[in-house]
Image (spheres, rainbow, N blue to C red):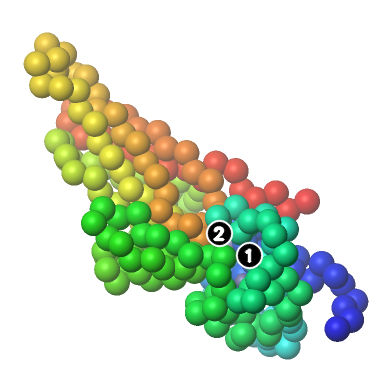
Amino acid sequence: MDFICPRIDRLISCYTCGAQSLPPFQLCEASHVNCPPCSKHMARCACGGRFARGPHLLLDWMVSALKFKCKYRAGIATGGGGGGGGSGDDACPLNRWYAVHELREHYRHECTRNAFPCPWNDCDHVARIETAADHYEEAHGPFQALIPTDVDRWHDVQFIIPPSTRADFVKKIFNGYFMFTMKYPTSPYRRKHPHLKPQITMRNLNPADQLQYTHDWEWDMFRKVIIVTVTIRELYDNC
Ligand SMILES: [Zn+2]
Ligand SMILES: [Zn+2]
Ligand SMILES: [Zn+2]
Ligand SMILES: [Zn+2]
């Protein structure tokens, strides 16, 4: 198979998260390709531009007429886990080119490099990186996605944790599923220091999400709630 452009993958790498993306594509005002999760859950493209309303039919048709390689094949850094070295194997051959519908099938049923065990407590389901979010919604959801309330701060989301929330909980924010764990100071200590804040850790459980996030939080003494802010740390460098 001859290719005019050996780096054909760049055509379909998402401008916002950098992942290989498959149609339907939604372009931003500056015509950057965005993958379906980014255009669905992000308020803006990484360039700050708004998304066009519908899919880009011309690009969808064109990409559907081309072939691509598995994104987990050996030697490709995926950032999402599953990859690894070696020379390919029978179920994920190194040099095979796939049409878009074949690639979708490959990721869902065939590839040996994208297994992903569900990290939820007491759940031993093994999904694939591509289907982990589907599994979360079916088995542990549904989750309401949190979106930015301020258009000028489209890269961060704020929410409130009610007082004395104890258990771990999960929030859907942008493309991620975040498991929050609260640790409160032990009670004798807390009686002496009533204003001591709990510690919050968060972990993104979506292996297909390549965005990086930071979180920050403050204790609102007046309302007695915790205000958490989750921010996209650095958007994928496309240069
Ligand atoms: Zn993306
Ligand atoms: Zn853009
Ligand atoms: Zn594969
Ligand atoms: Zn599970």
Residue 105 in percent (x, y) is at 55, 82
Query: Residue 106's quadrant in the figure?
Result: bottom right
Q: In what quadrant does ligand 1 lie?
A: bottom right
Q: Is residue 26 left or right of residue 134?
A: right
Using a 10 Å C-alpha cutoff, classify the residue at mark 1 as few (fewer than 14 neighbours), some (14 to 19) or many (20 or more). many
Query: Residue 55's quadrant in the figure?
Result: bottom right
In this view, the residue farthest toward the top is 192
Q: Is residue 26 visible?
A: no
Q: Is residue 55 left or right of residue 186?
A: right
Residue 135 in percent (x, y) is at 35, 69
- Residue drawn 61% across and 48% down? 235
Amino acid type shown at disc 2? Gly
Above or below residue 37? Residue 158 is above
- Residue drawn 57% across and 73% down? 111
Q: Is residue 214 visible?
A: yes
The reply to whether discs 1 and 2 touch (Cβ–Cβ < 8 Å) is yes
Q: Is residue 209 left or right of residue 87?
A: left
| Closest to the observer, 23 or 9 | 9
Query: Residue 95's quadrant in the figure?
Result: bottom right
**For mark 2, what is the residue?**
82
Q: CA distance from mark 1 to mark 2?
A: 7 Å
Amino acid type shown at disc 1? Tyr
Tell me if the residue at label 1 has its CB under 8 Å from ligand 3.
yes
- Residue drawn 24% across and 24% down? 197
**For mark 1, what is the residue?**
72
Residue 144 in percent (x, y) is at 30, 62
